[in-house]
Structures are given as C-alpha cells and as structure tokens.
Image (spheres, helix red, strand yellow):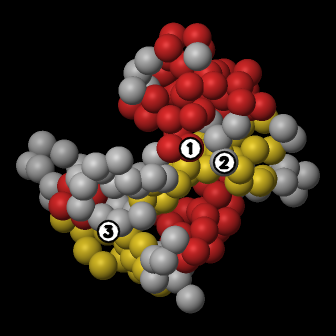
C-alpha cells in the first residue's frame, strides 16, 4: 500500500456520495454491479436511502435474513473499497461468500487496500461475537488469496461448487 494512503473503515456515509458513485461506475464498467443490485440510477437519485439501507442491514429483519455490518474504506476522503461482515452463516454462505466479503475500487487495486480493509475488519468481527470467520474466493483469484493469507487465513479446502465454474477456496481466520 502507498504509505501516504491511510485507510479508515467507516460506516456507510452520505459524505462519500461523489466518490462512491464514481466507484460504482467503475464496478459497473468492469461488470460487477451486484452489490448495489445493479440499480446505479436509484442509488444516485436517493443516496441517503441507499446509505440508510446499508446501515440497517446490521439488524435482523426476518428469521432468514442474515445481518451484515457494512464498512467503507476511505482514503484522503475518497471511497476506495467496501467490506461486509456477515454476523452468521447460512447454507448458501457456507458454500459461497463466507462471513466477510470485500471489493476494492478498480482504480485503487494493487495498493494494499483490501489487505488493510480485512486487517481492520477482523477486530470488528470479534466485537460481533465471532470467534473465527470463513472467507471464500475463486482458486484463480491470486489477489484475494494474498489478502486472506496476509491476514492469517488458513486454507481448509479447495473444491468445485459447480462443474462449470472455477474451484473455490475456503479459508478460516481465528479471531483472538
């Protein structure tokens, strides 16, 4: 990571509106609109409601809803990535997703942003009562493998989720 780029994890905030929307355009251009539901226009029109929804995800809504704490990585007052900590696992998350998922803004990659986000998120996971966390990634995702391993991830298995897809890696990190 650029030593001058100090990253801070913060709850979603309206103060990051412009840099967040720029990031969404980068993600969409890359083909990754999934974490806003693909509704860039709706997020632009009512950013406050989007932020409120992200903040409310930490509260259980239904018996099947998995609460998640969303945090945004900010460097020099700019949104540079996001990380989510799911408070528990269901059957789907045990196969794909795990407890923690993250994304770095494409133009900010290869600077240690994801490694630092995960490092800062692990104590937050501990405060949520988690004693260990599952992280998953594709076997071909060298960057994510490095992020997880640099943060103490222990590879437990690599397996095929589906015959037509890349193998999936399953890492656990024990929170002390």
| Discs 1, 2 touching: Cβ within 8 Å | yes
Q: Secondary structure at mark 1?
A: helix
Quarter placement of the N terminus: bottom right
Q: Nearer the viewer, residue 164 or 151?
A: 151
Quarter placement of the C terminus: bottom right
Q: Is residue 131 above or below residue 52?
A: below
Q: Quadrant of residue 18?
A: top right
Residue 106, how many percent across, how many down? 60, 34
Question: What residue would you read off at disc 3?
Answer: 170
Q: What residue sits 54% from the left and 19% below the top?
A: 43
Question: What residue would you read off at disc 2?
Answer: 11
Q: Nearer the viewer, residue 174 or 143?
A: 174
Residue 18 seen in the current view: yes
Q: Is residue 72 above or below residue 79?
A: below
Q: What residue sits 61% from the left and 22% below the top?
A: 47
Q: Is residue 15 left or right of residue 63?
A: right
Q: Looking at the image, is mark 2 or mark 3 earlier in the sequence?
A: 2
Q: Quadrant of residue 51?
A: top right
Q: Nearer the viewer, residue 122 or 60?
A: 60
Q: Residues within 10 Å of mark 1 (few under 14, many from 20)?
A: some
Q: Is residue 134 left or right of residue 56?
A: left
Outermost residue, right direction? 4
Question: What residue would you read off at disc 1?
Answer: 55
Q: Residues within 10 Å of mark 3 (few under 14, many from 20)?
A: many
Closer to the eye: label 1 or 2 = 1
Spatial distance from mark 2 to mark 3, Cα to Cα? 27 Å
Residue 58, how many percent across, how many down? 48, 53
Q: Secondary structure at mark 3?
A: strand
Spatial distance from mark 1 to mark 2, Cα to Cα? 7 Å
Q: Is residue 14 above or below residue 141?
A: above
Q: Looking at the image, is mark 1 or mark 2 earlier in the sequence?
A: 2
Q: What residue sits 42% from the left and 64% below the top?
A: 87
């Amino acid at each position: 990571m650029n030593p001058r780029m100090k990253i801070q994890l913060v709850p979603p905030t309206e103060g990051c509106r412009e840099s967040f929307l720029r990031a969404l355009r980068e993600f969409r251009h890359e083909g990754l609109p999934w974490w806003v539901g693909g509704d860039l226009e709706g997020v632009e029109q009512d950013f406050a409601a989007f932020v409120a929804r992200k903040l409310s995800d930490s509260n259980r809504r239904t018996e099947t809803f998995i609460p998640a704490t969303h945090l945004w990585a900010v460097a020099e007052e700019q949104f540079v990535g996001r990380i989510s900590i799911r408070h528990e696992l269901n059957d789907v998350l045990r196969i794909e997703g795990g407890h923690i998922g993250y994304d770095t803004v494409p133009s900010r990659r290869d600077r240690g942003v994801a490694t630092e986000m995960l490092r800062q998120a692990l104590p937050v996971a501990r405060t949520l009562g988690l004693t260990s966390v599952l992280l998953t990634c594709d076997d071909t995702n060298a960057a994510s493998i490095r992020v997880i391993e640099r943060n103490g991830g222990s590879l437990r298995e690599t397996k095929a989720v589906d015959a037509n897809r890349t193998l999936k890696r399953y890492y656990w990190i024990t929170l002390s």
